[in-house]
Image (spheres, rainbow, N blue to C red):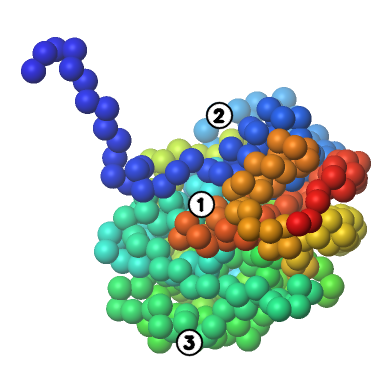
């Protein structure tokens, strides 16, 4: 073979998934100068106290590696907050791993706890990372459908019989995301108890992504499945600073799990990233100590934005599902004719001036979500109002 012959080859794992559609939509928003309601990052500043704490940490020379599984004061703050809010005592020395965002916490958890050949249950539509996460860890995702409500003010539901049927001897874990991206579903206590019963019966773990825990509406209450009797010892609770404190660029998150599971997660985390940014962990301890009023105000501000975007989308002709939590609105585009989600999203970003995410990026099958589009409302009111103005250009068929 000649010396300059070079075969381009990528791993089978990497070839099984595509680039993030959400992040691609952000690039398109910039290219077409559209209002970016695609990616879920706030365009308003983080709280001053939190920003100041980060500046002070850098100035105080907290600039070297933190302990690989997280700075002690930050882990203590995480344990304290979880116990206060969910009544679950956590040992910060043995049960917490600080990671680079909940994104790393999820992949580190799956790599540490699931084996090739095992299955993980994912509710569909799902936050787009879970599919690739399962593939990278060698596990096989099994999808259970969340059905949209007939009344768009209602709640997305799964069929308990379908969830049961998806479980088998090969199941390693059920991934829960509550409040849920993209549907806004907040899992109720009775739904979580049903999941608990199945986790116990089939001896599987729950891995729960709770990064929208404080963003709930209309009296909805966020419940951590770890707080439900029988689940503490079989749950990995994943969270991060990103959404609660509007610092998605900091990349600081964590996983709370029983000591044996945490040891494995810590090992994987160490070799994946070594650790999250030390000064930002110091600032994280300040963030987690913000007074309760901060979280009330956060939810109120998002509730106002939800109303603005929901009304605008409904006026423009979308069937817009009212979220009970998180900061997205999932919509059905059927009233705009037979156009599919990708073509519609392209039209929106290029001609209408609003970037949103095609529904299919939240589904495993290519035709899943083909009539759906997701909009994010974690934006300043001025930004949302620009989007509202642009959406008025849309024409129904
Ligand atoms: C459900 C869900 N999990 C995780 C993430 C990413 O979180 P992080 O910034 O902590 O990695 C997002 C971001 O949109 C999300 O919606």
Q: Nearer the viewer, residue 337 or 269?
A: 337
Q: Nearer the viewer, residue 368 or 335?
A: 335
Mark in the foreground, 3 or 1 = 3
Residue 64 bears which disc, if any?
2
Is 305 displayed left or right of 222 in the figure?
Answer: right
The residue lying at 40 percent from left, 63 percent from top is 141
Q: Is mark 2 within 8 Å of ligand 1?
A: no
Q: Nearer the viewer, residue 119 or 82?
A: 119
Residue 161 bears which disc, if any?
3
The residue lying at 41 percent from left, 68 percent from top is 142
Q: Which quadrant is home to the N terminus? A: top left
Residue 323, above or below 14:
below
Q: Is mark 1 within 8 Å of ligand 1?
A: yes
The residue lying at 50 percent from left, 60 percent from top is 367
Going from N to C along the chain, the mark reached first, 1 or 2, is 2
Callout 3 crowding tier (Cα within 10 Å): few <14, some 14–19, many ≥20 = few
């Amino acid at each position: 073979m000649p010396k300059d012959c070079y075969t381009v080859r990528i791993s089978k794992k990497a070839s099984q998934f595509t680039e993030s559609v959400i992040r691609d939509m952000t690039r398109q928003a910039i290219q077409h100068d559209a209002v970016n309601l695609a990616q879920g990052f706030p365009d308003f500043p983080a709280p001053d106290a939190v920003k100041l704490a980060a500046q002070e940490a850098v100035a105080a020379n907290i600039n070297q590696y933190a302990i690989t599984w997280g700075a002690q004061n930050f882990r203590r703050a995480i344990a304290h907050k979880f116990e206060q809010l969910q009544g679950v005592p956590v040992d910060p020395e043995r049960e917490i791993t600080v990671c680079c965002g909940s994104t790393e916490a999820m992949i580190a958890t799956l790599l540490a706890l699931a084996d090739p050949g095992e299955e993980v249950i994912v509710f569909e539509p799902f936050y787009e990372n879970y599919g690739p996460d399962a593939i990278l860890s060698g596990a096989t995702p099994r999808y259970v459908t969340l059905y949209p409500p007939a009344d768009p003010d209602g709640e997305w539901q799964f069929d308990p019989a379908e969830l049961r049927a998806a479980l088998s001897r090969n199941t390693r874990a059920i991934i829960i995301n509550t409040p849920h991206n993209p549907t806004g579903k907040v899992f109720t206590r009775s739904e979580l108890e049903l999941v608990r019963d199945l986790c116990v019966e089939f001896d599987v773990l729950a891995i729960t992504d709770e990064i929208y825990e404080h963003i709930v509406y209309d009296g909805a209450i966020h419940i951590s499945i770890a707080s439900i009797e029988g689940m503490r010892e079989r749950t990995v609770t994943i969270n991060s600073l990103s959404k609660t404190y509007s610092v998605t660029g900091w990349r600081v998150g964590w996983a709370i799990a029983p000591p044996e599971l945490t040891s494995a997660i810590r090992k994987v985390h160490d070799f994946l990233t070594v650790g999250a940014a030390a000064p930002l962990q110091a600032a994280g301890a300040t963030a987690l100590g913000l007074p309760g009023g901060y979280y009330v105000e956060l939810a109120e501000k998002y509730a106002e934005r939800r109303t603005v975007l929901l009304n605008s989308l409904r006026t423009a002709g979308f069937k817009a599902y009212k979220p009970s939590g998180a900061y997205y609105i999932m919509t059905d585009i059927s009233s705009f004719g037979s156009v599919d989600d990708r073509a519609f999203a392209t039209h929106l970003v290029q001609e209408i001036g609003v970037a949103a995410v095609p529904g299919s990026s939240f589904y495993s099958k290519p035709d899943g979500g083909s009539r759906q589009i997701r909009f994010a409302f974690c934006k300043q009111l001025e930004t949302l109002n620009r989007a509202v103005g642009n959406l008025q250009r849309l024409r129904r068929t």
